[in-house]
Structure formats: structure tokens, C-alpha cells
Image (cartoon, rainbow, N blue to C red):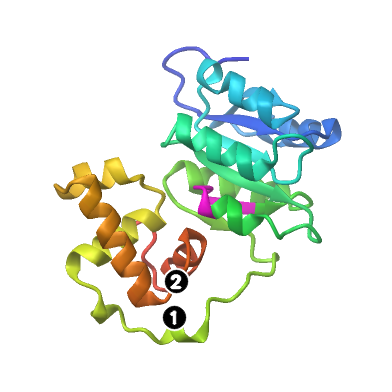
Amino acid sequence: MKAKAGDARVRIMIVDDHKVMRDALRNVISLEPDLVLVAEAENGQAAIESIERNDPDVVLMDGSMPGISGVETTRRLRELRPDLKIIGLTLYEETTYLEEMIEFGASGYLLKTGSPLEIVKAVRTVAGGGTYFDQSIPRRLVSSVSRQVSVRKLSDQELAVAKLVANGWVRSEIATALGLRTTEVDALRAAAMSKLGLRNRAELVRVANERNWLNT
């Protein structure tokens, strides 16, 4: 199901253990001229084994699959392809794993019952380097303490690193872009997280979204 070389469309892989869901997503994608479905996988192991062969840009990932979970699949795929964009798929009552997916590098999440327009918008946004969080999904608030911390307490380098981490860059990419060693990137990230009172990337992404740091 691999597209021809030179195809400029956004390449998508669907990972979901429910055939009905895969069929529905396939139908949505097939109607969009700028999107192309290059692969489907019914579980995390199949996705991991086929990622290099199919070379997607964006993965639509079920978060609650049996076997290798969507969280663990997200972690492994991002290790194999740090540039890969992943959107978590969830039912309204099953959102607890979304924080972990974001922590491991997912760029957003959607309700499985969302409209085709929202799915397409999310794919295009994430493919373009952005993040997309379905507004109908309840999101755990960052602590009030972290909300009150002034960004002025961050050094210029700490702020730069925090923004890039929130936007999904891995430390080797950040080091190259900012002319730093990877150990310096780690130290700057830790300092920024400490000053902001944040525990993980999921909380950092939320703060970044509130402060318009994403894609800047």
C-alpha cells in the first residue's frame, strides 16, 4: 500500500485493532486529495514491524489495544522514527493513557467518534509540525503553581529548549539546532521543567499551548 516515489501527499498509517474503525478512517482519508493511506496495522507489533517499509508521515494510533499498548507502540515508533507524527485515538471514557502518549512524543489526540472534518484537520495540523488536541476531551489541568510561574525566570536557552521539546523535537535535533551538546540540552530541559513546576512533557505541551509556544 506504499505510494509512489515523489508523491507529495501526507502519508498515513492506521493502527487499530477494530476493523470497523480502520474502515471508517480509511474512508475519511480516501476522500482527501492531499492525504494517502499507506498502511494499516491491527496491533502494535505489526505497526512496529512495518514502519520502515511503509514510511508514513502520520500515524493514527488506537491507545487501548491488546498486546503492545498504544502508549508502548508510540514509544517504540518514535525511537525508530523521531520525526514521526502520532495522533492518539480514544473513546471518551478511555482517556487515561493520553498523557503517557504525549509524554512519549505523540503530537495530539482525537475522539474516535469525532467528525471526519476534525480528523482531517488534525492530520494536516500535525503533518505541518503542529499539535492537535480534541477540545471535547477533558484535559487534566497543570497545577496552579506552574501556571503562576513567570516565563521570565527561564534563561533564553532554557526557553528555547522548552519550546522545541514541546514541539516534539528530540534532543539530538535540539542540540544541532542550538549548537549545544546533548548533555547541555538535557540540563536545560531539566532546569526549565523545574522552574515551571512541571513533571513531564505532557504538562509542558499543555503549558506551551496555553502560552502560544507551539510552532514558534
Indicate the position of residue 169 as horizontal and vertical percent values: 36, 47
The stretch drawn in magenta includes residue 139: no
Please identify the quadrant where the C terminus is shown: bottom left
The residue under label 1 is 146
The stretch drawn in magenta includes residue 106: yes
> Which amino acid type is marked by label 2?
Leu
Residue occupying image coordinates x 39% and y 60%: 214
The residue under label 2 is 198
Of 184 and 114, nearer the camera is 184
Farthest residue in the left direction? 179
Residue occupying image coordinates x 79% and y 52%: 113
Query: How many marks are shown on the rendered structure?
Result: 2
The part of the image, by quadrant, that contains residue 162 is: bottom left
Query: On screen, 90 above or below 134?
Result: above
Of 113 and 200, nearer the camera is 200
Indicate the position of residue 2 as horizontal and vertical percent values: 57, 15
Magenta span of residues = 103-109
Residue occupying image coordinates x 76% and y 49%: 112
Q: Is residue 47 left or right of residue 129?
A: right
Q: In this view, does 113 lie to the left or right of 59?
A: right
Query: On screen, 117 above or below 200?
Result: above
Query: On screen, 70 above or below 81?
Result: below
> Which amino acid type is marked by label 1?
Ser
The secondary structure type at the circle numbered 1 is: helix
The answer to which of marks 2 and 1 sits earlier in the sequence is: 1
Farthest residue in the top direction? 4
The secondary structure type at the circle numbered 2 is: loop
Residue occupying image coordinates x 17% and y 50%: 178
Indicate the position of residue 181 as horizontal and vertical percent values: 18, 46
Please identify the quadrant where the N terminus is shown: top right
Mark 2 touches mark 1? (CB < 8 Å): yes
